[in-house]
Image (cartoon, rainbow, N blue to C red):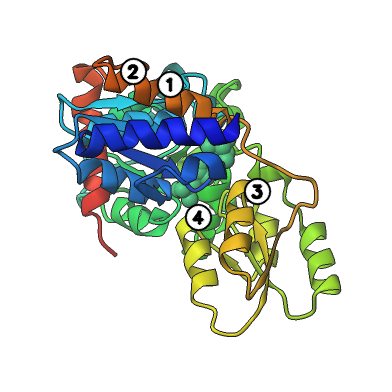
Amino acid sequence: DEAELHDRIADAKAALGDRVVVLGHFYQREEVVRHADYVGDSFQLAEAAKAHPEAEAIVFCGVHFMAETADLLSQREQAVILPNLAAGCSMADMASIDEVEECWEQLAEIYGALDEPDAEGLLPVIPVTYMNSSAAIKGFVGRNGGIVCTSSNARTVLEWAFARGRRVLFFPDQHLGRNTAKAMGVALDRMPMWNPRRPLGGNDEASVRDARVILWHGFCSVHRRFTVDQIERARAEHPGVRVIVHPECPMPVVDAADEAGSTEYIRRAIDGATEPSVFAVGTEINLVQRLAAQYPQHRIFCLDPVVCPCSTMYRIHPGYLAWVLDELRAGRTPNRIQVSDDVAVPARAALERMLAARP
Ligand code: 13P
Ligand code: SF4
């Protein structure tokens, strides 16, 4: 039962001491988060993975692409462990390496050689991938002069890319790409969307030629559920409510909200409120419920009245955490996530560019 699992995890952690670091994403359930040494957004957890070279193992309570990222940023001999290998991310799965390479070839037909800068030193297109993508995609980006972003640094990263290229190919999340570019003043008619199942992504050549940002056809099934209607209802029922949503929400939702930002941004916004306030939050329910419990002086609720957990984050059951810790204690390394060297070298370059990019 729950209490027994809790004790088993706590015992194993105590026995392992500094040999293991447990990282937990904000969307993890409470029974997992309480055992994490670090809880944070995907950017913070990437930095935490890098900051513990002494640990033999990093147990990543999150989804597959986050564990891959931890493997890329940690030491070679450190084992990164994903307690349940079935914890993926449906958005990350929406950009396969074959589709992205095919898109790249089509762009080369339109723009010409993609590795040749023009008279002003700008490349025709810079690939930018959201952290929520496979290591293979990060490797592609690294090989082609591109960079990774998270929801907390997307704007800084796009500025980095526009300093080096005429255009950006942004994948997999169309919403983060559109919301960020729009906030930077890019016109909507210069953001065609690329549907990998259609020739030229479903666009005509002129719109691709004219593009500032080409958006990939991906989305998060949790965040796309939020609607403007929900925001209007929250405002009607709670005058003065502060509406904060994640930038993976569709553009009309971000526009109707008071603020949009990463999971850490949302946490900080609530943490910084000095007066008792009402917050309607558009992100995953486990984070919203935890914030509501941590800040009882405020009224904090999820915009979507129907509970909307990220089903793959939820696959990290505490039973799996207990199991991997017991295995580590016995000297075994189950569910290790290891990115092969041919992918890891360029993928790491793309991540290091992100960590170095400053506003
Ligand atoms: P953060 O980068 O804000 O942690 O978000 C990750 C994620 O998967 C959001 O759906
Ligand atoms: Fe992926 Fe969405 Fe889950 Fe985040 S909330 S891990 S983007 S499916």
Q: CA distance from mark 2 to mark 1?
A: 6 Å
Q: CA distance from mark 1 to mark 3?
A: 26 Å
Q: Is residue 63 left or right of residue 50?
A: right
- Residue type for callout 2: Glu
- Residue type for callout 1: Trp
Q: Nearer the viewer, residue 15 or 23?
A: 15
Q: Is residue 259 left or right of residue 253?
A: left
Q: Are marks 4 and 3 in contact (CB under 8 Å)?
A: no
What residue is drawn where x is 34% and y is 18%?
Answer: 327
The response on whether ligand 1 sits within 8 Å of label 4 is yes
Q: Nearer the viewer, residue 181 or 23?
A: 23
Q: Are marks 2 and 4 in contact (CB under 8 Å)?
A: no
What residue is pinned by disc 1? 323
- Residue type for callout 4: Thr
What residue is drawn where x is 48% and y is 44%?
Answer: 33
Q: CA distance from mark 2 to mark 3?
A: 31 Å
Indicate whether 240 appears above or below 51.
Answer: below
Q: Which mark is residue 263?
A: 4
Indicate the position of residue 7 as horizontal and vertical percent values.
Answer: 46, 35
The image quadrant that residue 9 belongs to is top left
What residue is pinned by disc 3? 285
Q: Nearer the viewer, residue 353 or 319?
A: 319
Q: Which mark is residue 327?
A: 2
Name the front one of labels 1 and 3: 1
